[in-house]
Structures are given as C-alpha cells and as structure tokens.
Amino acid sequence: MYVCLCNGYRDSELRELARRGFSDAEDAFLALGDGPCCGGCLDFAQTIMDTERAQPGCPDAGEGVEDIEDKAA
C-alpha cells in the first residue's frame, strides 16, 4: 500500500529498509530518493518501521545502519 502519496513510497519499501537497519522514517525516505514533502505520512511511516523492527530477526534497535553495513563487509 502507498504510505507517501507525494513520493509514491510503499509500506513494503519501508519494511525492507527497517529490516536493513534503518530506524528513522525520514532517513528511510532519503534512502529511497527524496525526503518527506508535506510530512503528513511521517507518523504512519514511522509506525510501520517500528513495527517491522520489533519483529524477530530484525537488527537490534540500538544497532545503526553503519553497524549493519560493517557486518556485511
């Protein structure tokens, strides 16, 4: 489903970024190409990412994207 109508970002894209270690919706938007426009979707986007990161197997909330990238190297 579309979460951000301004940029056309979907929940599946946000969930994937959360599984890769992103914890902030604004950072995820930037990784997808553009930051938030109107900002009306940010709370919902953050909820999606928080919910995904709470799932078993996701990186720890304390682990940053840099930590995850280091482990992959």
Image (spheres, rainbow, N blue to C red):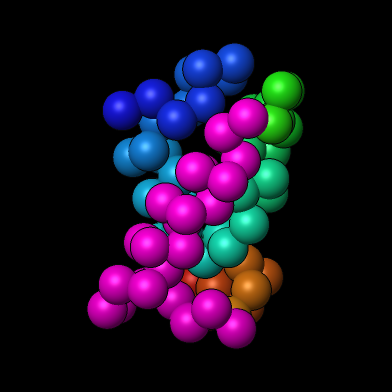
Q: Position of residue 68 (x, y in %)?
A: 55, 73
**Which quadrant of the figure contains the N terminus?**
top left
Up-down relation of residue 73 to residue 22 (above or below) = below
**Image check: 6 left or right of 34?**
left
Q: Is residue 7 magenta?
A: no
**Which quadrant of the figure contains the C terminus?**
bottom right
Q: Is residue 4 visible?
A: yes
Q: Which residues are magenta?
A: 40-62
Total numbered labels: 0
Q: Could you tell me which residue is drawn at 45 percent across and 30 percent down?
A: 3
Q: Could you tell me which residue is drawn at 60 percent across and 83 percent down?
A: 62
Q: Position of residue 18 (x, y in %)?
A: 46, 58
Q: Is residue 28 visible?
A: no
Q: Position of residue 16 (x, y in %)?
A: 39, 50
Q: Position of residue 72 (x, y in %)?
A: 49, 72
**Image check: 27 left or right of 69?**
right
| Residue 12 position by quadrant | top left
In the image, 66 versus 1, the foreground residue is 1
Up-down relation of residue 8 to residue 62 (above or below) = above
Q: Is residue 47 magenta?
A: yes
| Residue 66 position by quadrant | bottom right
**Image check: 48 left or right of 43?**
left
Up-down relation of residue 72 to residue 17 (above or below) = below
Q: Could you tell me which residue is drawn at 52 percent across and 65 percent down?
A: 21
Outermost residue toward the left in this view: 56
